[in-house]
Image (tube, grey):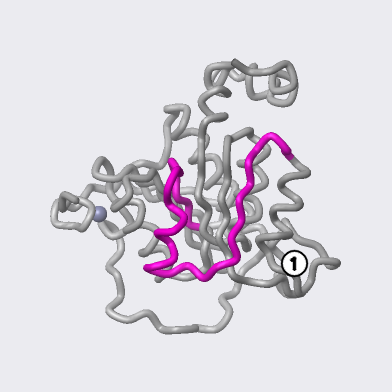
Amino acid sequence: MLTNDQKQRYSRQIISPSIGEQGQEKLSKVRVLQIGAGGLGSPFSLYLVASGIKELTIIDNDTISLSNLQRQILYNEKQIDKDKVFMAKETLSKLNSEVEINVYKDYVDDKTIRKYVDGHDYIVDCSDNLATKFLVNRTAIEYNMKCVISGIKDFYGQIMTIIPRKTACYECVFNEPEKFTSKEGPLPVIGVTPGILGTLEALEVIKTTLGLPNLENKLLMVNLLNLSFNSIDLVKNERCVCSVSH
Ligand SMILES: [Zn+2]
């Protein structure tokens, strides 16, 4: 049951025929693990927390620098050199104190990611590197968590949603490189690109929860130079890791 405060806070969602009080109650039970608190993670966490989920756990190891502020809209000039996750928690808790925000300053790799998966329905990639995207995908499959992965560069982005064992996964679509180059140096990016793709990641969590049309078995490719949004249909690869039973 929604409280009177919740009915007021989420009133504009509740009057949507696609959401209603029932949909809002579904959202209020969702627990999300967010990997990365940068360009994608900023709008993702802001919109998701505003929408009224139950719990958001954020993992990131970075501190805030001046060059982040062009796109990482969770942060401001006063927070330079501070840890991203703690500043994120401060802002997000002020936005919606009803949502439980857990943050961990940690580097995400094969071993550490397992510490945080418990009790989450979704794992969402808001990272800036390919190795983490493959890791998030494999973790989603192993722990049976719904998953959204996005990547951006310059004016371009792509995004897909994965329901383990049911839909195509990231590895069904992309071949994992034999070796990840450690650091390619900074990629070009216009701040609006992660703004839009991170927002779409939040939308995917919301729509997947509500059973609305989403990016399952689809890869959405966004080109913000000519403003085209094209999705291609994906087919699950029966020889992929996601089809091998665990
Ligand atoms: Zn797969």
95, 161: nearer the viewer: 95
Say if residue 220 shows up in the picture.
no
Q: Would residue 118 appear left or right of 155 to someone viewing this image?
A: left
Above or below, 93 against 37 in this view is above
Position of residue 144 in the picture relative to residue 185 (left or right): left
At 53% across and 17% down in the image, what residue appears?
22
Establish whether ligand 1 lies closer than 8 Å to the Cβ of label 1.
no
**Front residue of 157 and 114:** 114
Specify the segment rendered in magenta.
96-125
Residue 74: quarter of image = bottom right
Say left or right for 236 vs 120: left
Q: Position of residue 205 (x, y in %)?
A: 49, 40
Q: Quadrant of residue 70?
A: bottom right
Quadrant, the N terminus: top right
Asked if the magenta segment contains residue 123, the reply would be: yes
Question: What is the x, y in percent for residue 102?
Answer: 61, 50
Q: Position of residue 94 (x, y in %)?
A: 78, 44
Q: Is residue 30 visible?
A: yes
> Disc 1 designates what residue?
69
Residue type at mark 1: give it.
Answer: Leu
Q: Quadrant of ligand 1?
A: bottom left
Residue 194 x, y percent position in the rendering: 60, 58
The stretch drawn in magenta includes residue 50: no
Residue furthest out toward the right? 78
Q: Residue at x 58, y 23 (%)?
A: 24
Residue at the spot 44% in from the left edge and 28% down from the top edge:
212
Q: Is residue 22 above or below residue 75?
A: above
Q: Check disc 1 and report its element: helix, strand or loop.
A: loop
Residue, x 85% and y 66% (percent of image)?
Answer: 78
Q: Residues within 10 Å of mark 1 (few under 14, many from 20)?
A: some
